[in-house]
Image (tube, coloured by chain):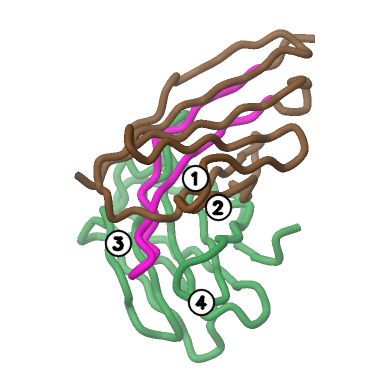
Amino acid sequence: DSGVTQTPKHLITATGQRVTLRCSPRSGDLSVYWYQQSLDQGLQFLIQYYNGEERAKGNILERFSAQQFPDLHSELNLSSLELGDSALYFCASSDREGGELFFGEGSRLTVL
Amino acid sequence: QQQVKQSPQSLIVQKGGISIINCAYENTAFDYFPWYQQFPGKGPALLIAIRPDVSEKKEGRFTISFNKSAKQFSLHIMDSQPGDSATYFCAASRASNYQLIWGAGTKLIIKP
């Protein structure tokens, strides 16, 4: 158990809809990262927050947005969903910028 | 220059054999090279990491070999076991910002 909690574990929705994925980092970790992993694909970095501030952006679509709240939990919002958005979405946290990343078990999104 | 190239994409090794996964990078500013292990249905977890001040780091059956001049690093799994079957990701980052650049992953299968 990494200590990172992601909800929901599974989500099935339709094209055009909007979903929110939630991540609670390990206790004390200030940095949160979001990654997308499509079937049998690598990890695509989406975005990083540190103590509530956006720190880095990767290949995140304009339809996607994220934020980190004062209690350090983070949410990833995915809107106008397309079939190609079906993937595993991972959250990871670290105690500082850099260092070991601790990943959650992911949220599996299926868009029908 | 930001890429990390990982090979092979997939690998099948007999139980007891040596598994070798290779990664190459171009950015000479990279100075942190971790390997993450991902089991099906789970998030990646840090397996072992190396910095370029050493050419080799060993932890149990897992060894990272690092060749600074060739800009390559590799993971060796000695006496490979069926429980080692997983996807392995290499990554690299610069100390200044620690944004990890990920390899594409290697799916390792150890045959009993």
Q: Label 4 belongs to which residue? A: A96
Give coordinates of residue B1: x percent, y percent. Answer: 19, 44
Q: Callout 3, which amino acid?
A: Phe
- Please give the chain letter of the residue carrying mark 2: A
Task: Name the N-terminal-most of marks 1 and 3.
Answer: 3
Question: Would residue B111 be found to the left or right of residue A71 on screen?
Answer: right
- Marks 3/2 in contact by CB < 8 Å: the verdict is no
Q: Label 3 belongs to which residue? A: A64
> Of circles 3 and 4, which is in front?
4
- Marks 2/1 in contact by CB < 8 Å: the verdict is yes
- Marks 3/4 in contact by CB < 8 Å: the verdict is no
Please determine if labels 2 and 1 lie on a single subunit: yes
Q: Quadrant of the C terminus of chain B?
A: top right
Rendering quarter of residue A112: top left
Task: Name the N-terminal-most of marks 1 and 4.
Answer: 1
- Marks 1/4 in contact by CB < 8 Å: the verdict is no
Q: Callout 4, which amino acid?
A: Arg
Q: Label 1 belongs to which residue? A: A88
- Please give the chain letter of the residue carrying mark 1: A
Which residue occupies 27% across, 49% down? B28
Stretch in magenta = B85-109
Q: Callout 2, which amino acid?
A: Ser
- Which of A6/B85 is in front? B85
Residue A45 drawn in magenta: no
Alpha-carbon span between mark 1 and mark 4? 24 Å
Which residue occupies 67% across, 17% down? B18
The answer to whether any part of residue A83 appears in the image is no
Please determine if labels 2 and 4 lie on a single subunit: yes
Q: Label 2 belongs to which residue? A: A107
Which residue occupies 42% across, 37% down? A42
